[in-house]
Each structure stands twice: as C-alpha cells, then as structure tokens.
C-alpha cells in the first residue's frame, strides 16, 4: 500500500467514511464500520485534455489548490485550477445520508480561449491478498472491482469510452486506455469516462459514484446492476442539499455548550479576542462533525481515529477502540448532547467486550471483536466504571445503572484482585495463575510496564463511582460499600507510599523512575484522588512547567518522549494542563493553552495527536478523537 499518513479531511455517514489529502486525493475508504474494512490502496483521478497525457487532479505541477468544507457540514470542496489549460475543476465529496453511497461531484469549466476536449480517467487499485483476491469487470457502463466478500462499484451517468484492466498503472499515464477483455484477474485497473467538448467559457457537471456491496447479501452482478440503475435515478444536487440540511441541523442540535448562538454566554464570559474565538468555534464545529464519523452506530464502539499507518511503519496502528480513549470521548459526547451514543457504548460495546474475569483488554475493533494487542492496561477497566457513573450524572436514568450493574460488579472484583496483589507484602502469596503475576499492566501511553499513579487514580475513581452507583440504586448493603471504601482508601494509601518523592515533595508517575509525566494530573482531573491545591500537587505541576512545557507554549507527554521524533507538544497534554488550571481557578492560563491548541489545529479544524515544534503545524494523526474530546471537556469547564 502507498504510504499516505495524513488524513487531512474526512467525509461519511453512519457506515461509510473516507479520508482525503489536502489536494483532494481519496486516501482511504472504510465500510461498513470506521475501522474495517479499508478498501483503497490507490485511487487517482485525472483528465486528458485534447491530445495531452493524463493530468493528475491531485498532484500536477500546473495545478493550484484550495480546499474547504461547506459550512457546518461533512461536505468537502476541493478547487483545482490547471494553469496550463486554464481548466477549473471543483470536486465535491460527500456521502448520502440514507444510502451508503459516496459521491464525487465535479464541475469543470473551460476558462481558456479555445475549445477543450476532456476525458475523465480513474485509476483504482484496491487492497488485495492471496486469500481475498480482487478481480475486475466492466459491464453495463459500470466499473466493478470485486472479491469473495464484496463488490466495489464505480460508475457515472457519463458513458465509459475506454478502459484497461491489466497493467494499467503505466498505461494510464498516457490517457489512452485499450483493452479487449471485459473481465480480468487484477486489483488495479483504469477507466475513462467521456466528458466531451467544452467550448470556451462552458461549464459541465457530472458525478462519480462509489457503491460497496456486501456479497453475503447479494452476490449476482445482475442484482447489483439493478441497484445501481436505481441509484443513478437520484437527483444528486437534491441529495447534496439534503446532506447540507442534515449536517447543519446536526451541528445545531449538538451545540451542547451553546457556543454558536448569537450573544451566547460563552463568548461573553470568556472574552476571547475575535480571531481566537473564530478558531475556537471552527474546532468546536469540526469536533461535533467528527465524532459521528468515528462511531460504530450498531455497537457504540468508538475508533480512536481513522487509520494512518496500515503497514505499521511508525506505530501499532490507530483505528481501534481503546476503552480509555472512548470514556474520554463519551464524556465529550454527553457535553454535546450525544447521550444516546454514549449509552450505546456502555450498554452494547462495553458489555460485549468485557472478559469473563471482569477486565477489558487493551483495544478492540469497533464491532466488538478483539483487536491485536501487546498487553493490558488496568486503567481501562477502571475507566469504564468511572465513565458509567459520569454518564449517569448526565442522563439521571437509574435504568441505565441497572442495565450495567452486573458488568460493573465483575469489573470491581477484578480491580479488587489487582489492589490485593499490588498491596501484598513480599512474604504473602497470591492466588495462582493470576494475570497480575505473569503480566504487568502498561501505563496509559502503552510504553511502560509496572504500577502507575495514573492507573491507581483511575482505580480509586472506579471504587468511588461504584459506591455512588450503589447509593443511587438504594442498594443498602453497608458491608459492600464499606469494603469499597476500604479498597479506595487502600489504593490511595498505596499511592502516598509509593509515588511520592520525599526529597523534592513531588509526585512520581510510577515506582521505577522520576520522570515528569503529564498523566500525573489524572490524579486530580478527572479522577479527584488528590486535591489540586495540595502542596505536593503544586510542586509537581511546577516541575511539569519546567520540564514538559515547550518554548512554543504547548506541553509534551513526558520527559525524553521519543515517539514520532519526540519533544513535540501534544494537544492532549496541553489540554490536560488547561483542565488543571481551570480547577485551580487560573482561567486565563487555561485560555492561553486552549488558544495554543486551536492555533495549531488544521485549517479544517481538526486537532492532531501532536504539533510540530518547528512549523507549529499539526503532526501525525489528524482528527484524533481523544484530542477533540479533551478540547470539548476543557471548553465545558471554562466559566
């Protein structure tokens, strides 16, 4: 697969989602969920003008680009101006709302003084494997690419004038496609649609449709062709207006912080400068529009991000659901009035993925199947219980607590065993074959095994949440609640004994080193095991400011972080410090950190995993769900 790490923009609906480069090249297309399956290896669009070779729409030296979303929507426009032929092209990418169809709408205008004859050419290479080999077929003016599991159809109301089914990558460069066959054993093929003559000043519109069929439901081409003929009857401009209305309504309904209305309290109370407030709104709107594109609507699973590194060149991949990330995201969903989506995450996904021993593994596909892992993270199990009680505080529905009570009890039993294990003296023994004896928990960054302050703080919050759940359900089991309180006190005492540097009077992230780590703030926010005004906490934060704050104003995760080059600020870390400052009553300091995040977000309003310290541009994973969640949480805490 071609290396293409940066998803600059994203469009989609409940089942289909696609990402694009800054020049409008489609990089990835997922169906029927956000993480599986990804179809595209390479998809290039181009035009042949008169007798020219192929002009690639997304990477020609004579092309100028401008890309933007239609306001308050997941509809993407990419304007392409070819200065050699004076040909202007507007590409509009969007997904139907009620049908799983991706549309690429084109408006081509001849701004030259001479007539231009135009062909529109698509080169499509799908991901293929020995066990799921891709073939190609041309039939009824439709370009089919298919395997055992699916049929990937590209079609238009324009006529197909030529195609190449084998060895097409080189031949497509000339723009002259020739093939005698109608079917081939190939995963990369090219097709040419006839746009026709454009007189000087003339403009033409057409659409390219992409429709994916699950072959387990319909596998005869005749059946798929009938479906496509019905799709062609759609008025695309009318559908485009419907999609605009849908997303505009969606943004309005999910303006949970009332930031977008005229004269809102957020703008009055916080007094951001106009240019900063504009950026804040831009990122806020994009957050609202991003979250539904990360959600599995059937299970409630939440993808951390769209995938960026299928070949694992730089990381262990991203397009999975980590329970911890998801809990932060569900907090943001609740703030944005997406409470049904949050309930689904706990009622369906969390129940489906819990192990018999009560724990949750490191990560999952959004459909609930176990994803590749390399260990477990105890904080994820604790976070689920904490998240359930947070969600209850939003919806105040005791039925929700009842539905998830047994799941919480199983998780609490697992956490009790963990606390018992780590608090044992050297002379005491533990039950045999316990996971804790053979495998240490990773920290939240997945880089260090051992016992961690952040994880222990999450466990403290889980016990506290379980006590509150029992109270809300009026379960008058005083013995159980007293036992939970004892475990809560025990884990806090363990932290006091093991994560305190006595000489410097600062907190340590784990038992093995004294490296400053932004996740230590988790003990204060969100888990509230420690008070933000305690002297030891203030000392620790001062150490963070000296060691983790970059000269550009953001915060790195921890000292000597080497991931993806290292020493780059993370919006998550920067916003975590903002959350602490807000709890401390330091609103202005928090606002400066929030401004750093929105100033380094992409033009479209996406927050990345990191910020390049040199360029102050977004780096690595763009549109990271956890980053956007921390942003929404920080805004909600501002008065």
Image (tube, helix red, strand yellow):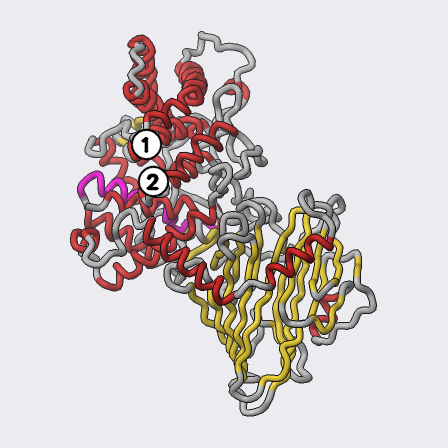
Residue 385 percent coordinates (x, y): 38, 26
Q: In the image, 285: left or right of 320?
A: left
2 and 1 marks in contact (CB < 8 Å): yes
**Residue 575 is one of the magenta-drawn residues:** yes
Instruction: Give the CA separation, mark 2 to mark 1.
Output: 9 Å
- Dot 2 lies on which element? helix
Q: Pick the quarter of the image with the N terminus.
A: bottom right
Extreme-right residue of the structure: 180
* Above or below, comparing residue 497 to residue 513 in the picture: above
User: Camera-side residue: 450 or 69?
Assistant: 69
**Mark 2 = which residue?**
334
Q: Which mark is residue 390?
A: 1
- Magenta-drawn stretch contains 109: no
The magenta stretch is 565-585
- Residue 455 lies, in percent from the top left, at 39, 28
Q: Quarter-wise, where is residue 112 in the image?
A: bottom right
């Amino acid at each position: 697969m071609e290396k293409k790490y940066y998803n600059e923009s994203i469009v989609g609906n409940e089942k289909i989602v696609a990402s694009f480069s800054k020049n409008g090249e489609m990089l990835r297309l997922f169906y029927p969920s956000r993480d599986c399956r990804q179809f595209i290896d390479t998809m290039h669009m181009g035009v042949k003008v008169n007798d020219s070779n192929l002009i690639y729409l997304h990477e020609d030296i004579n092309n100028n680009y401008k890309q933007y979303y239609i306001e308050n929507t997941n509809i993407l426009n990419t304007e392409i101006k070819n200065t050699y032929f004076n040909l202007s092209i507007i590409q509009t990418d969007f997904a139907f709302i009620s049908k799983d169809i991706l549309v690429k709408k084109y408006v081509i205008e001849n701004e030259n003084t001479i007539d231009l004859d135009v062909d529109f050419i698509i080169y499509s290479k799908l991901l293929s494997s020995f066990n799921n080999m891709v073939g190609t077929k041309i039939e009824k003016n439709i370009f089919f690419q298919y395997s055992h599991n699916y049929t990937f159809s590209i079609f238009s109301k324009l006529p197909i004038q030529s195609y190449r089914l084998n060895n097409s990558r080189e031949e497509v460069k000339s723009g002259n496609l020739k093939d005698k066959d109608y079917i081939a054993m190939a995963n990369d093929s090219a097709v040419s649609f006839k746009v026709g003559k454009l007189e000087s000043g003339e403009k033409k519109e057409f659409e390219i449709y992409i429709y994916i069929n699950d072959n387990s439901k319909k596998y005869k081409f005749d059946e798929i062709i009938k479906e496509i003929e019905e799709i062609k009857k759609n008025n695309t401009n009318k559908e485009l207006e419907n999609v605009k209305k849908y997303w505009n309504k969606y943004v309005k309904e999910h303006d949970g912080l009332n930031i977008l209305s005229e004269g809102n309290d957020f703008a009055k109370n916080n007094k951001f400068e106009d240019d900063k407030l504009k950026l804040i709104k831009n990122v806020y709107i994009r957050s609202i529009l991003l979250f539904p594109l990360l959600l599995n609507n059937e299970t409630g699973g939440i993808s951390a991000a769209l995938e960026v590194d299928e070949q694992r060149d730089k990381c262990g991949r991203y397009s999975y659901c980590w329970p911890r990330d998801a809990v932060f995201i569900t907090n943001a969903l609740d703030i944005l009035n997406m409470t049904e989506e949050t309930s689904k995450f706990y009622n369906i996904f969390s129940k489906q993925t819990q192990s018999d021993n009560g724990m949750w593994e490191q990560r999952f596909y959004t459909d609930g199947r176990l994803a590749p892992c390399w260990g477990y993270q105890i904080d994820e199990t604790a976070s689920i219980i904490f998240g359930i009680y947070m969600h209850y505080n939003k919806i105040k529905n005791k039925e929700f607590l009842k539905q998830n009570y047994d799941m919480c009890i199983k998780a609490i039993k697992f956490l009790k065993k963990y606390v018992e294990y780590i608090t044992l003296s050297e002379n005491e023994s533990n039950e045999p074959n316990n996971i804790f004896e053979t495998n240490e928990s990773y920290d939240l960054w997945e880089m260090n095994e051992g016992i961690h302050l952040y994880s222990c703080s999450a466990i403290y919050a889980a016990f506290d949440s379980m006590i509150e759940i029992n109270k809300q359900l009026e379960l008058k089991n005083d013995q159980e609640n007293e036992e939970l309180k004892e475990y809560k006190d025990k884990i806090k005492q363990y932290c006091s004994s093991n994560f305190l540097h006595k000489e410097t009077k600062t907190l340590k992230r784990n038992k093995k080193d004294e490296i400053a780590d932004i996740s230590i703030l988790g003990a204060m926010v969100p888990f509230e095991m420690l008070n933000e005004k305690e002297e030891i906490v203030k000392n620790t934060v001062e150490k963070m400011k000296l060691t983790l704050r970059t000269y550009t104003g953001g915060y790195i995760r921890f000292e000597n972080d080497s991931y993806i080059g290292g020493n780059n600020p993370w919006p998550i870390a920067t916003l975590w410090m903002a959350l602490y400052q807000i709890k401390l009553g330091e609103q202005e300091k928090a606002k400066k950190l929030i401004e750093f995040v929105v100033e380094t977000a992409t033009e479209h309003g996406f927050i990345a995993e990191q910020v390049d310290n040199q360029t102050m541009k977004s780096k690595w994973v763009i549109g990271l769900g956890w980053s956007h969640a921390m942003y929404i949480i920080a805004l909600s805490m501002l008065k």
